Amino acid sequence: MQVLKFGGTSVASAEAMLQTIDIIKKALEEDRTLVVSSAVSGCTDQLISIGKQAAARDESYRKLLEALKERHHQIVEKLLPPGYRSKTTGAVDALFGELESIVQGVYLVGELSPASLSAVESFGELLSTCILTDQFLSQGIACRWLDARELIVTREGAVDTAETYRRIGETLSRHVHTELFVVPGFIARDADGRPSTLGRGGSDYSASLFAVGLHARKLEIWTDVPGIMTAHPKVVPSARPIPFVSYRAAQELSHFGAKVIYPPTIQPVVAEGIPIWVKDTFHPEEPGTLVEKNPPRTHGGVVGIAHSEGIALISLEGSGMVGVPGFSSRLFEALARESINIILITQASSVHSMCIAVASADAQRARKAADDCFAYEISLGKLNPLKVEKGFSIVCVIGDDMLGHSGATGQMLAALGRHSIPVRATAQGSSERNISVIVPSDRADEAIRAIHHEFFDRYDTQVIPLFIAGYGRVGKALVDMLRDNAAAIAKRSGKELRVCGLARSTRYVIDTEGLDLSRAGELLEAGKPGSYIDALCSLSLENAIFVDCTANEEIGFRYPDLFQCGYSVVACNKIPFSGTYAQFRNLQLDAHKAGVALRYETTAGAALPVLVTLDRVVQSGDTLVRMDAVLSGTLNYLLDNYKGTGWDALVEDARVKGYTEPDPSIDLSGKDVLRKILILSRQAGLPLEEAQVSLEPIPADIAERYAAASAAGHKLRYVASVDAEGHAVVGLQEVGPESPLYGLRGTDNAILITTGDYPSPMLIQGAGAGTRQTAGGLLNDIMLAL
């Protein structure tokens, strides 16, 4: 079960309701759904005005009521199909009839009691959910409307959660086959059956109660912003949605000004650990913000900047405070008696002075309370008269794990210092979840922008941590490319490819701030023994990519572990993809489930775009008819340069040039080509197994085969072929001048792909071997994995 809550802007018009309905329909494809809706935007305020005008015997309330009724009629007219309009209009009119009766009673008695106000306010949600429910029914979607007043019970102004959860559970258990429920938010009844409402953020509170009562797997709050933002977008144009945030950090952000969620209303789901998604109704494709107990760590631990205006500072100082216990408690008690909330407090370690921040509206009352409390000490000159200063704002840096990232306070103050923004007071909790400063209100926006730039905008070039396994020829070439081209890549793509880990068979080195690539070999020599992948899985990094430059079977078995830890994988290691077809398919499925990328273009054809072409063939609905390919740059180099003698010397020359596998016998056995044709066939949708492939190694009578081919005007090529039925052959073939494979030179590969849509085969040709080509292909895959 899932609970979706939609705010007033999400149902403000027929167009908005259609968008909301589309979101709900997509949600129904995943799970049973309960929808909690607010009133049409602005409706609750209008209802309050109607009630107040009626209580004041102001006849103009009737015009407001009629205008509100007409607004709902217009929504029905635009939203509902003709066959349903009269039914829904009748239901809307019936609700307005009840509302008019209540308001008429208010008008006659000239009083708007709390119970009457709650009754009047409740009609906004009743109207919006009535329209939503009928729209679903008009589309043939089974939907049940539930009356929240029968389910949410209040006692003495607070929700009776035990009774509420009992009623929710019992009611829903009677409708186990219903897929969609629509419930009005905000409204309830007290224990005596009188209408009541849930106050500020009431619809969010309703949704939280239903989520807990139903043991929902998630709560989605749909609004008109793309999530909880790193700062107020009107103050910081570069503010962006926070992808993940903890419950506590979200509550801190909300307390200090972020209005997306109201902390008290989400407390029920926080207590139960139910994740909350905050999403944008009008841009549902955007990821939004996930609020959960243990979110992934962010760079530097900071998640957002919040602020509150209208702050006053009260300063208390004097020599009489030094060494005398109880001053703080006396001040707190005096302010508490006046119901004055202390927003922030700082105190010198010498206990000579104390500064508290309160709302400007409370400043004079706070001053009087403190003066009265310390009148005796002031009269003796032990304390100076209290000083009140207004015109301040509080700016907070909020995060989940700033304690684990040193320097957050220093960064914040340094950013303010660079802009010469005075700081009047600072405060920091022991958990470093909140670091607050008091600044002049006329500099507050500037302060927020400076701090935001320090923690977020400086990192607009996204850091992509790379962890490379294998430091042979290809691994070294890749490291060199990354070192030499880092600046150009960052400028072109906005991504900083940062090598944070490097490993070879016996040792590894990791530094999440980045390795000095000019000393890569030296760092590896001094590296740690042990499991590189275990070490990677102990980290918590975003956008990390594991690059497999090995020919190691064991590493391939660990790919699923890396996926689960959030790593994308880029590989030139053929072994994980050329085992059984089930292993190949499971790797793809595991990566997809984990939401990470798996790219292995360089496993066949080095940097040639072969796999991506085959993937597009499959994705377009086309089918493979036949594939004929020269897939070994090594063997093509040998066969192209062979003149009938000196075969062994030619093989050694190819090894020295980096054209062969580390063990050239793998190339000569045809095993390398076998692995490649398995990968290509599977990418084309054929569940080919190794046992189905007929394999002929380079024969011992290569000289005789060469002589026979030359006599016929042919050339020898080592060709892998497969057809739509999965008949696959790998071996030496003679090709004549009419074949596209005849003219191959050096380490070239060539792949001829015949499909249903392309009966004349497509030809992909180019260098298929070489250290630099493979490293370049890996780099291309890394960029595509981002």
Image (cartoon, rainbow, N blue to C red):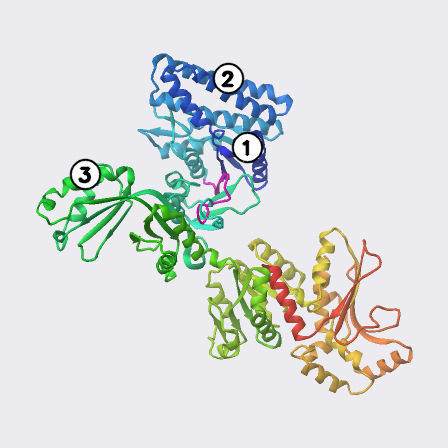
What residue lies at 87% left-to-right and 82% top-to-bottom? 707
Residue extending furthest left?
Answer: 380
Residue corresponding to mark 2: 94
* Label 3 crowd (10 A; few <14 / some 14-19 / many >=20): some
What residue lies at 79% left-to-right and 75% top-to-bottom? 745
Residue corresponding to mark 1: 178
488 left or right of 380? Answer: right
* Whole-number angstrom distance, CA of label 3 to CA of label 1: 60 Å
* Label 2 crowd (10 A; few <14 / some 14-19 / many >=20): few
Front residue of 47/688: it is 47
Residue corresponding to mark 3: 368
- Visible residue check, residue 697: no
Name the secondary structure under disc 1. Answer: loop
* Label 1 crowd (10 A; few <14 / some 14-19 / many >=20): some
Examine the structure image and report whether residue 413 is included in the region drawn in magenta: no
**For residue 8, above or below residue 270:** above
Q: Amino acid at mark 2?
A: Ala
Examine the structure image and report whether residue 227 is included in the region drawn in magenta: yes
The stretch of residues the image draws in magenta is: 215-232
Q: Earlier in the sequence, mark 2 or mark 1?
A: 2
Front residue of 426/138: it is 426
Q: Amino acid at mark 1?
A: Thr
